[in-house]
């Protein structure tokens, strides 16, 4: 019978500067959502060879979900498929709109207008890389 265990590891930097995998002692069937940040990987055995997920999971909850899915794959007999960490970062435009919405809800119209102006000016500058001198000149100050 094949080994169907899936383990979660935290990829941590030690004091001497080297990196190591520290096993996380958690049950994959836990129902609690763990929003513990870190650099997590999952491992399993493919025959006698230990396999690791590609990429890192930024939160323990993401690693638990991937571990559960991998464990089900191993139980079904198709555990040869690789596991890749999904990018859970928020796109800049979505975060910017959320910031503006939160600023507007705070009820300070002057702050909202200034934040909206700065954000739109910053977004218009994406795609080109202005130097610090040109950035400060556009604001009326010179370094």
Image: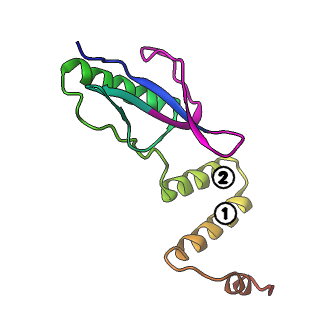
Tell me which segment is drawn in magenta.
13-41
In the foreground, 84 or 100: 84
Label 1 Cα crowd, 10 Å radius (few <14 / some 14-19 / many 20+): some
Horizontal placement of 55 versus 75: left or right?
A: right
Q: Which residue is mark 2?
A: 103
Q: Which residue is mark 1?
A: 115
In the foreground, 125 or 49: 49
Picture disc at residue 125? none
**Residue at 24% of width from left, 17% of height from top?**
75
Image quarter where the C terminus lies is: bottom right
In the foreground, 142 or 29: 29
**Residue at 64% of width from left, 52% of height from top?**
104
Mark 1 touches mark 2? (CB < 8 Å): yes
Q: Quadrant of residue 96?
A: bottom right
Quick check: is 98 in the magenta stretch? no
* Local secondary structure at mark 2: helix
Q: Position of residue 113 (x, y in %)?
A: 67, 64
**Residue at 67% of width from left, 59% of height from top?**
112
Of callouts 1 and 2, the N-terminal one: 2
* Local secondary structure at mark 1: helix
**Residue at 57% of width from left, 37% of height from top?**
20
Q: Position of residue 66 (x, y in %)?
A: 38, 30
In this view, which residue lies farthest toward the left? 77
Horizontal placement of 57 versus 47: left or right?
A: right
């Amino acid at each position: 019978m094949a080994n169907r265990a899936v383990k979660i590891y935290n990829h941590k930097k030690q004091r001497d500067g080297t990196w190591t995998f520290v096993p996380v002692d958690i049950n994959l069937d836990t129902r609690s959502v763990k929003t513990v940040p870190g650099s997590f990987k999952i491992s399993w055995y493919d025959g006698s060879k230990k396999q690791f997920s590609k990429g890192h999971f930024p939160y323990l909850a993401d690693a638990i979900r991937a571990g559960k899915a991998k464990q089900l794959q191993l139980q079904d007999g198709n555990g040869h498929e690789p596991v890749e960490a999904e990018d859970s970062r928020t796109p800049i435009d979505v975060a910017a709109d959320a910031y503006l919405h939160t600023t507007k809800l705070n009820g300070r119209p002057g702050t909202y207008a200034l934040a909206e102006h700065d954000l739109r000016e910053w977004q218009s500058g994406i795609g080109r890389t202005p130097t610090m001198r040109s950035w400060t000149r556009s604001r009326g100050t010179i370094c």
